[in-house]
Amino acid sequence: MSGTRFGGEAFFFRKRFFCHFHPTRDYLFLETFVWNNVEAVVSEVPGTIPHPEYGGYGWVRLPIDSEDAVSKGRQLIETTYGILRTTRRVSIAKEDFRLETLGLLGTRLPEIRVRVKESKKRKQLVLEARGVSDSEKADDLLDKATRILKGPRRISVSKRIN
């Protein structure tokens, strides 16, 4: 899916913004979101740099200034897509978060690496299917991990009454 962001064409994966072209007076930049993989992507795709303002948040930038840069841009998008297909963020209310659940996840799905970040009211968990190159298998593993972390879906009171 495509749209616009920051004055340029933008692209989305599962309705989430992950990549855009950023035109300036002198350059056209391709900027992509790569989670915590900035250094790896910078090493893998020549010419790519951490975003000057948002590199610490997971963004990288590639100037598109030649035919060679267009080829590198394609490589950057493919690399980013691979990361997106194997990474997912899950948000859980602090009161619903259990350390035992993380242990269970580690036992049942050792392929899933979890990083936990705290915000004021929630735990943000970044799940990564390590070493899984098959997108469908990664989706399946990430779905299972999400179900383990969030537990069985609760039925709202209004749905039980009806």
Image (cartoon, rainbow, N blue to C red):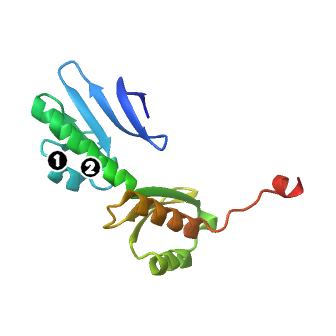
Judge whether 31 appears above or below 23 on screen.
below
Residue 35 seen in this snapshot = no
Seen in the picture, residue 26 relative to 57 is either above or below; the reply is: above
Label pair 1/2, CB-CB below 8 angstroms: yes
Q: Residue 5, located in which quarter of the rendered image?
A: top left
Tag 1 secondary structure: loop
Examine the rendering and report whether any part of residue 108 can be seen.
yes
- Numbered circle sitting on residue 45: 1
Q: Residue at x 16, y 52 (%)?
A: 44
Q: Which mark sits nearer the N-terminus, 1 or 2?
A: 1
The disc labelled 2 sits on which kind of residue?
Answer: Thr
The CA span between labels 1 and 2 is 8 Å
Amino acid tagged 1 = Val
Q: 10 Å neighbourhood of mark 1: few (<14), some, or many (≥20)?
A: some
What residue is shown at x 46% (from left), y 66% (from top)?
141
Q: Which residue is mark 2?
A: 79
In this picture, residue 11 sits left or right of residue 119: left
At mark 2, the secondary structure is helix
